[in-house]
Image (cartoon, rainbow, N blue to C red):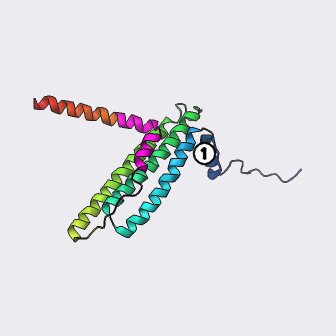
Amino acid sequence: QGTIHPFRKTHRSIFGKLLQEFTLVCSDRRCWTILLFGALNLLNTGCLLMWCSSTNSMALTAYTYLTIFDLFSLITSLISYWVTMKKPTQLFSFGFERLEVLAVFASTVLVQLGALFILKERYMCFFLQGSSAGGNLRGALLPPLTLLSVRNKPFSYFYFYLQEHYVDKSGSSLTDSC
């Protein structure tokens, strides 16, 4: 018989819950490919960021933003695997598919913001007549390799939608010009 603790904290911390869900996702073997490419991409992005700060190259900065987008694409793949493992609950009766949509939306907004930042830097360089040092792009094979090796279900739906929309637009412009 001890002291009564009416407000005892029985729930784990947010970090503990995230760690539990991460171990659930990592139990799938396909997840290790994503984690390997994520680690390589993170290392490549860190090197590119350091190189961008020393060279002040806009092309290299744009390429670095592309690798950051690839990193978010890999995170979206992990979220997609997690969604397929989770069953609908009383609170989320339709499951967790909305998280995939939010992850894709956040990634595309990140790309748009990065493009606006590059555009702003380009105009500042144009008006201030600054010089930008270039260089060869090391690690240029990692983003296409990441895109081809990791199957990303939410982004494949997004790419299919863009391709379908592009075909509709190009088909209508071809018939209008004839």
**Residue marked by disc 1:** 22
Q: Where is residue 28 in the image (x, y as percent from the top left)?
A: 60, 38
Residue at x 40% of width, y 65% of height: 51
Three-letter code for the amino acid on which mark 1 is drawn: Phe
Q: Position of residue 77 (x, y in %)?
A: 49, 41
Query: 3 left or right of 121?
Result: right
Does residue 110 show up magenta in the picture? Answer: no
Q: How crowded is mark 1: few (under 14 residues within 10 Å), some or many (20 or more)?
A: some
The residue lying toward the viewer, choosing from 17 and 134, is 134
Give residue 146's quadrant in the image. Answer: top left
Q: In which quarter of the image is the C terminus?
A: top left
* Magenta residues (range): 135-160
Query: 88 left or right of 131?
Result: right
Element class at badge 1: helix
Q: Position of residue 71 (x, y in %)?
A: 46, 50
Main secondary structure found in the magenta portion? helix
